[in-house]
Amino acid sequence: MQPTAHAFPENARAALADARLRKALGTMKSGFQGNRAAAIARMPEWEELREEGRRIKDHVLAHLDVYLERFEARVVANGGHVHWARTAAEAREAVLAICRQAGARSVTKGKSMVTEEIGLTPFLEQHGLQTVETDLGEYIIQLRREPPSHIIAPAVHLTRDQVAESFRRAHGGLDPGRPLEEARDLTDEARAVLRRKFLEADVGITGANFLVAETGSTVIVTNEGNGDLTQSLPRVHVVVASLEKVVPTLEDVSTILRLLARSATGQEFTSYTTFSTGPRRPGDPDGPEEFHVVLVDNGRSALLGTESQEVLRCIRCSACINHCPIYAAVGGHAYGWIVPGPIGAALTPGLLGLEEARHLPNASTFCGRCEAVCPMKIPLPKIMRHWREKEHAAALSPTSYRYGLGAWAWLARRPSLYRTGAALAARLLGRLGRDRGRLVRLPFADGWTDWRDLPAPEGKTFFQLYAEGRRPNSPGDVR
Amino acid sequence: MTDAASGRGTRPRVGLFVTCLVDLFRPTVGFAAIALLERSGCTVAVPEVQTCCGQPAYNSGDRADAADLARRVIEAFEPYDYVVAPSGSCAGMIRLHYPELLADDPDWGERARRLAARTYELVSFLVDVRGMTRVDGARLAATVTYHDSCSGLRELGVKEQPRTLLHSVEGLILKELPDAEICCGFGGTFCVKYPEISNRMVADKAAAAASTGAELLLAGDMGCLLNIAGKMKRDGMAVEVRHVAEVLAGMTDGPAIGEGR
Ligand code: SF4
């Protein structure tokens, strides 16, 4: 995917004008928020659990090399292979090489944001491999050739009619008059189509929610069960995962799993939690003949030891996204990269650079809801502010904005001048808005007055009145 | 709360941090704050050298200017037992962000921490520190709804305190606002950087307020109030908008925010 984060303002404007998107996002918000709140209300030890989750990940990040090497050693001991990829290109090549080696012609894929990040599916298709997404949401956006707009519900930007349209177009051989109004009809049809693909596939590719250092296992959680079929039916299973997914023990997995499902969908546990530990052993009833793990760095290790290191604690639960009023207004595509919402705004500048992504950390009111709901206690506003500091230092923000800010700070250092300025402004604005009590148009402030009136000041400033001796109990009103 | 305990018997001296927006747009709120603080048994002073808490610079990535303004505020307010602001946003800036902003400076860092510990948003100060449970003599025959401003709510835990006091206002009926804890879209410079997104957010807020049937919307931060009032007036909605302190202090004779006289 080509990033369009640099065009966030334009993307956002287009998104706001899209009535269908608005409809789709409207339904999404209430569901996720309500379910999460209910699940957490049932769990008195929530705060301790968050603290524990944070501790686990901070420990891992401080010893990332140790745990990754331990993980690698266990995978190899179990008969699997580990491929280290510094960049997206290396990761793609590694997967392609595995597929070629296996003589593969067809590949199935489970939902994985890191494979979206490295652009794996289009790459494999270009190299002649039929590649099919098996998660329903991913399957839908693959049909539509769109990037995901959400990390756990990739097609959340679409209404049901849009999905039905896509199915009618893609599934040509079926009865054109068939009903596709209900969610059930759509799932059934996708299942039927996908079942064939599962059976044909030579290689199954999944992501991982966890890499377990003590056992060399990889873990995925899904609600559709497609991940299980993707990884157990084909001859070869390839896990593509980013470095920071590693945790020390199975015990740690269980701690974080308790945080993950509740934060994501409000479930106590996702429907399927699947552990893969190496290829099939003699006597195993099923499982792949080959087991590969591609460990993707793609910019993450460079974040270690920086002010944004804490983004690497993220478990991609999407709670911050689901509670973000900016995301709710513009949806995921506006962010122009794989991970949208607050975590995207905190992470993307670190992976793509500030030149590309500088708008994203500015797309926040710092309302703080993201940090409040984040199960891993990631200080998302603080990290976004940190990127703004970098942006300011590199003078990437518009000159007019920086000058305005500088002039205001200069004035704020001079209280008596500041007072005079405020009094003048109050008088001027007060005059302009005297009759209605508000201004409908104000030069240099169209950003405000294009959409709202500006309430007029009451008259004199507080400091003028106070200097004149006005006190709350003195007779007369304060004007 | 050792400060509170020691303060209650004497007459603690409060330095009022007026805030830029109250100074410029809504002096009534400043006087309402003085009235309420005095009624709670405090002596109120308004340090003359105050201007802005520095939040616009801080949130725009301009740490140097923000730190400079922070040091000035600390100096101006150090003589008082408490710093109180009729704004969760400015109080949150001093209480949470000053210590972080000046952390690398051993002297100023310590001074920032000491001031931060004595800094409060107005209504939570009245209830949590001064032990107010009601406001005597305030009356307002109106159905009102209350928006929880983000910084007050999430940085300072302001949630029940305004409701507690509002319940004691004679004639006032409080109707909870749906999605009261969702941001109104003001966000300081955000509302001019991303006016269209901000507009979408405040439109949702205005619609939620209208849906309650309340005649009056209250909140504790002028930023949110100007934003919400501006939107309601533009769209011709009848709901009036005021700062919660005006109602608690019984200062509702003048026009509401954005209303003509
Ligand atoms: S930042 Fe926190 S809330 Fe957001 S996806 Fe990551 S873990 Fe979940």
Image (cartoon, coloured by chain):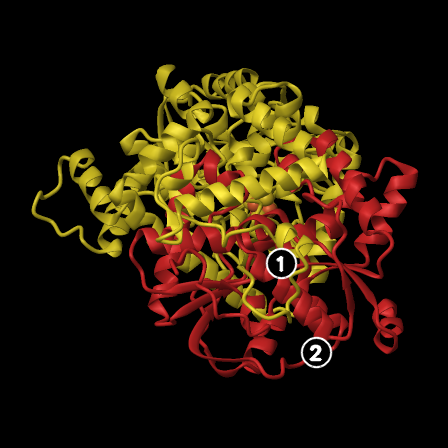
* Residue A231 x, y percent position in the rendering: 48, 39
Quarter that holds the C terminus of chain B: bottom left
**Tag 2 subunit:** B
Decide: few, some or many residues near mark 1? Use Cα within 10 Å; few <14, some 14-19, many ≥20: many
At x 55%, y 43%, the residue is: B188
Mark number displayed over residue B132: 2
Indicate the secondary structure of the residue bearing disc 2: loop
Left or right side of A170 for A446: right
Q: Quadrant of residue A332?
A: top left
Q: Residue furthest left?
A: A177
* Residue B142 x, y percent position in the rendering: 42, 77
Mark number displayed over residue B203: none
Task: Mark 1 and ligand 1: say if the CB distance to the nearest ligand atom is below 8 Å.
Answer: no
* Residue A166 x, y percent position in the rendering: 21, 38
Image label count = 2
Quarter that holds the N terminus of chain B: bottom right
Image height of A75 relative to B228, above or below? above
Q: Chain A rendered in what hue?
A: yellow
Q: Is residue A297 visible?
A: no
| Amino acid type of the residue that numbered disc 2 sits on in the rendered structure | Met
In front of the other: A124 or B142: B142
At x 62%, y 32%, the residue is: A408
Q: Residue furthest right?
A: B107
Image height of B89 relative to A448, above or below? below
Indicate the secondary structure of the residue bearing disc 1: helix
Q: Which residue is mark 1?
A: B152
Image height of A178 relative to A479, above or below? above
* Residue contact at pointers 1 and 2, CB within 8 angstroms: no
At x 46%, y 43%, the residue is: A429
Q: Chain B rendered in what hue?
A: red
**Tag 1 subunit:** B
